[in-house]
Amino acid sequence: MEQVFKSGKEKMKKAVGVLEKELAKLRTGRASTGLVENLKVDYYGTLTPLNQLASISIPDSRTIAIQPWDRGAFSEIEKAIQKSDLGLTPVNDGKVIRINLPPLTEERRKELVKLAKKYGEEAKIAVRNIRRELNETLKKMKNEKEITEDDLHRGQDEVQKLTDKYIAQIDEILADKEKEIMEI
């Protein structure tokens, strides 16, 4: 039974980790390398993350500078940025691609909060699916007489506590992100 809880805990941690990665991509009022570093660029026929093709820096709070290592990648990087759902326009001066982040409008902030909540809901669904999986495993163990009826109920209570803990963690992460997005 310990093994069941351990694997469940690992999976729930991963779900929270995925949420944190998704939220890092969401734009707040400040420039962040997290916005673009995992953008997929078509580099000689292979989709490659941007951070493997260029150095990405933040010269000031509203600008992202991308310096490709290969001159041939400039146009593909620009295309990838324009195609992304970030709504950003790259400016290429032949040496560096700059992205200027305009201040967020109230409307855009609300859209970002909605998107953050959507990501949060997906993470919660993932955690609940893990809970269902763990409970099914426990029931199987009871049916195969590996654990008793009492162990099953104790196990299900433990799984529920684990689920509640991770759902609360997700809510907390979302509240922080929402506050960060709405901050002017």
Image (cartoon, helix red, strand yellow):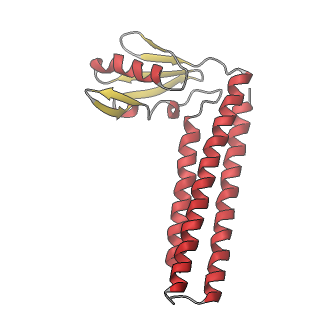
- Residue that sits furthest to the top in the current view: 93
Quadrant of the rendering where the C terminus is positioned: top right
Q: Position of residue 140 (x, y in %)?
A: 51, 79
Instruction: State the image quarter where residue 162 is shown.
Output: bottom right
Q: Is residue 107 left or right of residue 37?
A: right
How many numbered dots are placed on residues in this image? 0
The residue lying toward the viewer, choosing from 182 and 163, is 163
Q: Position of residue 117 (x, y in %)?
A: 67, 41
User: With respect to residue 142, does 117 lie above or below?
Assistant: above
The residue lying toward the viewer, choosing from 29 and 12, is 12
User: With respect to residue 126, does 53 lie above or below?
Assistant: above
User: With respect to residue 90, does 12 lie above or below?
Assistant: below
**Residue sitting at x 58%, y 73%:** 135
Q: Position of residue 35 (x, y in %)?
A: 52, 31
Instruction: State the image quarter where residue 131 is shown.
Output: bottom right
**Residue sitting at x 58%, y 19%:** 101
- Residue that sits furthest to the left in the current view: 44
Instruction: State the image quarter where residue 47 is shown.
Output: top left
Q: Is residue 138 left or right of residue 153?
A: left
